[in-house]
Image: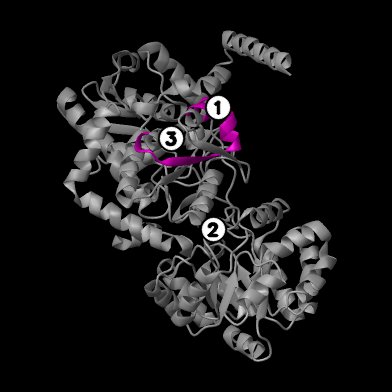
């Protein structure tokens, strides 16, 4: 099923969906398996799996370190693709890949889309590929039915949001604030005004990410957005308390 | 933006959405400035009063006689304020920052020259300044860290990745996406997302404009060849632009051969076989990367050349065969530096000395009535610790040991 449709049918039953994030190969693919199992058991609706890159420009210290350590342990793109296939075969929720454009460019764009499609990957989040730089990418995304998820930022004008919306599918990823991943966000009046602008610019579901850490943060965006994205927080949790802590953490979010 | 910032198939602006508006603003300010003759005039005035422009073109008579071929001329970018061509770019961007009304600048630096130049500009224009520098480079270019801090800049040592120039660039981008409203990123070379490659090259074109005028006045005709070292490529783009439209002038870019082009320990992207097309740090160019697209470790004795990517404009000119690329090893660089100091009393930076190596190889093949120009992008005295180490200089070592003891005793006395 197409990503948007899957999300919509889940939204019919829940006030807010949860999307979680992992860095593939950090601290190991074996741990990733345990974490994903906990996440699914905890009821997450969608998981983005980051294929590590040596230059993760948009990521903060937690995810940056996870990228570097995963690569130092020898994680390859081929292993990530195989892992993605394994997860989609095992669990009935949508899985996405998040990575940087060079990974796809070097793999070969068409080959990447073909392999994603056959591995059952439903969407791609590529923070350094704006639509004007990726004509071929967006054409292939349509052809292979792998949703290109685009990002809105607080600095995006209405005109820009409309432009992005024309190339987007699946959902829109609204970055909660300026900055990189993993730091606290303020969900205040300015934020509400920003989310209202996002909502006006697209009919796609809205995900909110960057700095969502607890039940209070999830509650703050419920009713205003459709999906809460938990990124760096689960990596921190696994580092500090081990994989077993993930399930209870997810269950406590809503 | 014309051609979306591409030169042939190279360049572009692969940037996170958060930076989209700020790039629009930067691009439109840059276009306006480029069309405005007063902007360039203000730039020239500042460069001739705050820095030492025009920089001289020195005839290297002793080296010319030594090699017995073409007349060797040296374009003296080392005589700029802060000792390198970096000032040209930084002052230009500083004037743009004033136009845009931003109050804070950030920069990455490898050798430290760009950091020092940015700190200087920030002090002069009253801007807050933070400089990102890889931990490895902080170690090898300590004197530059000292000067940046003395001029009021905050220097942040970057401990991620290979802890060199590319990691400093990533960290500067992370700062920029956080502080985009108040801050301009003074990118130091002709790389990165559009419009940086074009903009930095435009400010650096002052080198080529002067060099062309100077060589015609001194030599009566254009040079046969022009040599420049290539890290990111801004000094090379600067001097080459004076001669790009004259096909009879051969342009040669010299990359870091490190321990040797076949050892894997180098930073040669456009000569050699280790680089391939890629997209990172916001632009498409030839990168030193593995088959998965992960960037490789690079090596050079010269911190300013120790970088995985190269200007997309140079990738284009290489593909068009307008610029020829060669490499110089660390050992060759030390040898050329030694010869230049002894014969001419001039101290090129380790980066610049790469250009000298290739020029020395080729000068004897050319006739005595021909001239060549080497762009001396910077001065070498900033490299005193690295150069003294490479020469294994005994009296310098004694001095350091003695000074170290003195400081250690000072510290003991105080604690």
The magenta region covers B124-147
Q: Secondary structure at mark 1?
A: helix
Chain on which label 2 sits: A
Q: Secondary structure at mark 2?
A: loop
> Which residue has dot 3 on it?
B119
Q: CA distance from mark 3 to mark 1?
A: 15 Å
Indicate the quadrant where residue A241 lies: bottom right
Residues tagged 3 and 2 counted as in contact (Cβ below 8 A): no
Chain on which label 1 sits: B
The residue lying toward the viewer, choosing from B212 and B178, is B178
Taking the magenta stretch, the answer to whether it contains residue B138 is yes
**Would residue B398 be visible to someone looking at this image?**
yes
> Which residue has dot 1 on it?
B142
The residue lying toward the viewer, choosing from B256 and A41, is A41
Estimate the x, y position of residue B162 in percent, counting from the top left.
61, 43
Q: Across the whole image, how many numbered discs are drawn on residues?
A: 3
Q: Secondary structure at mark 3?
A: helix
- Of the numbered discs 3 and 1, the one sitting upstream in the chain is 3
Q: Vertically, is B351 above or below B179?
A: above
Image quadrant where one finds the N terminus of chain B:
bottom left
In the visual, does B219 lie left or right of B297? left
**Residues behind callouts 3 and 2 on a single chain:** no
Within-10-Å neighbours for mark 2: few <14, some 14–19, many 20+: many
Q: Vertically, is B322 above or below A94?
A: above
Indicate the quadrant where residue B377 lies: top left
């Amino acid at each position: 099923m197409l990503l948007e449709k899957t999300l919509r049918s889940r939204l019919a039953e829940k006030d807010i969906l949860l999307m979680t994030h992992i860095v593939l190969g950090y601290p190991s693919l074996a741990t990733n398996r345990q974490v994903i199992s906990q996440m699914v058991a905890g009821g997450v609706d969608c998981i983005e799996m980051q294929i590590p890159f040596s230059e993760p420009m948009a990521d903060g210290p937690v995810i940056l370190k996870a990228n570097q350590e995963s690569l130092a342990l020898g994680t390859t793109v081929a292993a990530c693709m195989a892992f993605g296939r394994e997860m989609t075969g095992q669990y009935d929720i949508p899985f996405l890949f998040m990575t940087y454009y060079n990974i796809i460019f070097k793999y070969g764009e068409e080959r990447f889309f073909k392999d994603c499609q056959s591995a059952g990957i439903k969407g791609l989040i590529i923070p350094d590929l704006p639509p004007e730089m990726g004509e071929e990418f967006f054409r292939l995304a349509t052809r292979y039915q792998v949703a290109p998820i685009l990002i809105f930022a607080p600095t995006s004008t209405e005109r820009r949001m409309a432009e992005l919306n024309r190339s987007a599918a699946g959902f829109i990823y609204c970055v909660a604030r300026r900055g990189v991943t993993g730091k606290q966000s303020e969900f205040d009046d300015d934020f509400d005004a920003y989310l209202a602008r996002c909502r006006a610019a697209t009919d796609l579901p809205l995900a909110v990410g960057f700095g969502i850490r607890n039940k209070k943060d999830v509650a703050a965006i419920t009713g205003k957005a459709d999906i809460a994205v938990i990124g760096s927080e689960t990596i921190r949790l696994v580092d500090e308390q081990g994989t077993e802590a993930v399930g209870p953490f997810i269950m406590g979010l809503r | 933006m014309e051609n979306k910032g591409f030169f042939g198939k190279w360049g572009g602006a692969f940037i996170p959405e958060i930076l989209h508006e700020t790039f629009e603003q930067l691009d439109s300010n840059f276009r306006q400035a480029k069309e405005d003759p007063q902007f360039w005039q203000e730039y020239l005035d500042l460069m001739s009063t705050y820095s030492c422009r025009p920089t001289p073109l020195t005839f290297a008579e002793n080296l010319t006689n030594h090699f017995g071929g073409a007349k060797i001329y040296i374009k003296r970018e080392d005589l700029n304020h802060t000792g390198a061509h970096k000032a040209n770019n930084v002052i230009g961007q500083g004037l743009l920052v004033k136009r845009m009304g931003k109050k804070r600048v950030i920069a990455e630096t490898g050798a430290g020259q760009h950091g020092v130049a940015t700190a200087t500009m920030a002090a002069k224009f009253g801007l807050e300044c933070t400089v990102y520098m890889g931990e490895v480079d902080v170690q090898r270019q300590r004197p530059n860290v000292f000067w940046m801090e003395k001029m009021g800049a905050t220097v942040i040592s970057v401990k991620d990745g290979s802890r060199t120039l590319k990691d400093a660039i990533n960290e500067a981008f992370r700062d920029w996406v956080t502080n985009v409203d108040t801050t301009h990123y003074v990118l130091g070379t002709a790389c990165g997302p559009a419009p940086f490659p074009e903009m930095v090259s435009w400010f650096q074109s002052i080198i080529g404009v002067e060099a062309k005028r100077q060589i015609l006045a001194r030599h009566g005709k254009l040079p046969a060849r022009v040599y420049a070292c290539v890290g990111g490529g801004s000094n090379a783009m600067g001097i080459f632009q004076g001669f790009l439209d004259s096909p009879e002038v051969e342009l040669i870019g010299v990359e870091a051969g490190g321990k040797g082009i076949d050892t894997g320990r180098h930073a040669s992207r456009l000569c050699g076989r280790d680089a391939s097309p890629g997209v990172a740090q916001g632009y498409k160019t030839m990168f030193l990367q593995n088959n998965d697209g992960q960037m490789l470790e690079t090596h050079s004795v010269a911190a300013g050349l120790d970088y995985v990517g190269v200007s997309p404009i140079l990738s284009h000119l290489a593909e068009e065969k307008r610029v020829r690329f060669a490499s110089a090893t660390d050992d060759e660089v030390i040898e050329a530096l030694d010869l230049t100091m002894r014969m001419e009393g001039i101290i090129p930076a380790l980066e610049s000395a790469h250009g000298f190596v290739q020029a020395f190889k080729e000068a004897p093949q050319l006739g005595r009535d021909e001239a060549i120009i080497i762009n001396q992008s910077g001065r070498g005295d900033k490299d005193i610790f690295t150069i003294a180490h490479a020469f294994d200089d005994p009296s310098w070592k004694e001095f350091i040991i003695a000074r170290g003891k003195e400081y250690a005793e000072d510290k003991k006395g105080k604690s």
